[in-house]
Amino acid sequence: MASLSGFYASQSEAQDTVDADQVKRGQYLATAGDCVACHSAPTGKPYAGGLSLPTPLGAIVSTNITPSKTHGIGNYTLAQFTDALRKGVRADGQRLYPAMPYTSYALVTDEDAAALYAYFMHGVAPVDAAPNATALPFPFNIRTSMAAWNLLFLSDKPFRTDPSKSAEWNRGAYLSRGLAHCSACHTPRNVMMAEDSAREFGGGDVGTWYAPNITSDAISGIGSWNEQEIAGYLRTGDAVNKSQAAGPMAEAIDHSLRHLNDADLHAIAIYLKSVPPIHDVADTRAASAWGAKADDLISIRGVALPTDLNRMSGPQLYDAHCATCHQAHAEGSFDGGLPSLFHNAALGRSKANNLVMVILDGVQRQVDPPELRMPGFAHSLTDQQIATLASYLTQRYGNPKVIVTADEVKSLRQGGAPSNLVALARAGMAVGLVVVIGLVFFVVRRKRRRST
């Protein structure tokens, strides 16, 4: 087998004559990696960067990865491109923040890295524009600190096939753990913001949204789904009587997953069905197994609305804002285009973030043309009204143990609870500095005693 340096050399020599098939393959791989979603601002050009990504440490602004030689990656060699992709190191030696999921892309093979390089250099239009620079608070603005973080949490081993598994399983593992970077959202983070490998795919917070458990556990995860349902959901964002995609997952489907071929989606489904189960003790039945058809609207006919609209009941709020589309019994639209609210994972989970976020923001899909599937009520309903409505929905059609408070709605409306990581990091550095000063004082004092 040729050495890695030899591989880079041969690829660099051929980069000006790269064939169309390699560029096309690189485009498919970039789509699988959903690169366009983060590296494109809402009104900007593809891959030109400028999207502000909220994180617990502050906003990280995505960079220009077009082949612009002034503001993009047009001067990158294949080796430099691969280092950025798999190691999080830019061509100038500066470290990337792991908002760019290089910890997942570390699994990308040399051949696929070369195809991606060919696409970004030959298949993407250069954009000579510089996005705003990322400005995180101290101490996270010191990018060299990422070197220590990488030593702890970054693997330097590309994906290796498991000979005991099928070719489909290996393909699904490669995509799920690598380019599709499913674990970046669906795995919880530890105190250092690294993925908790002991709970891989066990569910994690993504800003104000919750990426659910997608292990093979039949109650907490997707173990009750069959492979066709998983693959179909990844293609369309809809699994009948189970779940509908919204928020970040809808974006991942619209920008990336729906464009993958059937074989790759099936391979991902096969792999996810094999992921070791992780069970959450709060879950007593599958999220989509809760609820049944019910109608409480007759109880409010002829009942006047309260003078204080914050005191409206759940049935009154449902009648005013939900029944027109989801029907009186919450069974969804007659043509199946709008889902039922019972047997619906959004109402059955023990964590109601996604339900509240859907009520606040609605559901918009970036298909062709863009489609509004549900309007948001952030500007028409108060925190208390949304809490009352969400609690009514969970208790009537979903998990009856879940009660949503107005304070929870307020927090999600404002972007979620503030992070204390910055304060903790500064406190840790202060303690470290005190320790260092103490050690220096101790050494100096000891030397003085020896010299007297």
Image (spheres, rainbow, N blue to C red):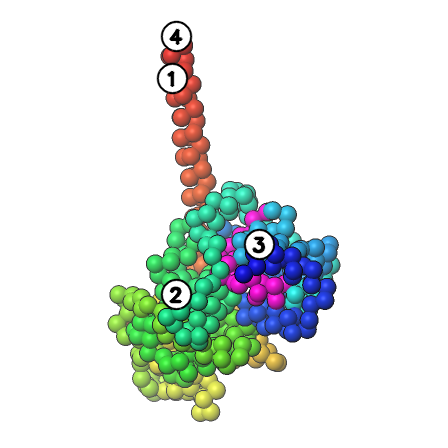
Residue situated in front as seen by the camera: 153 or 302: 153
First-in-chain label (1 vs 3): 3
Q: Nearer the viewer, residue 407 or 251?
A: 251
- First along the sequence among labels 3 and 4: 3
The disc label shown at residue 446, or none: 1
State which tag comes first along the sequence, 1 or 2: 2
Counting residues from the start of the chain, the first of labels 3 and 2 encountered is 3
Mark-to-mark CA distance, 1 and 2: 53 Å
Q: Is residue 452 above or below residue 414?
A: above
Question: Which residue is found at the position 45% from the left and 59% from the top?
Answer: 416
Q: Earlier in the sequence, mark 1 or mark 4?
A: 1
Is residue 105 covered in magenta?
Answer: yes
Q: Name the mark nearer the viewer: 3 or 4.
A: 3
- Amino acid at circle 3: Asp
Report if the CB atoms under discs 3 and 4 are less than 8 Å apart.
no
Q: Give the labeled residue for mark 2.
A: 201
Amino acid bearing label 2: Phe
Residue ID for mark 3: 83
Separation (CA) of disc 1 from disc 3: 46 Å
Q: Which residues are magenta?
A: 94-117
Question: In the rendering, at what x and y percent does residue 20 appear?
Answer: 68, 73
Residue 112 belongs to magenta span: yes
Measured as percent of width and height from the top left, residue 191 is found at 39, 50
Q: Under tag 2, what secondary structure?
A: loop
Provide the residue designation for mark 4. 452
In the rendered structure, which amino acid carries the disc numbered 4? Thr
Q: Left of 273 or right of it: where is 80? A: right
Pick the front one: 91 or 164: 164
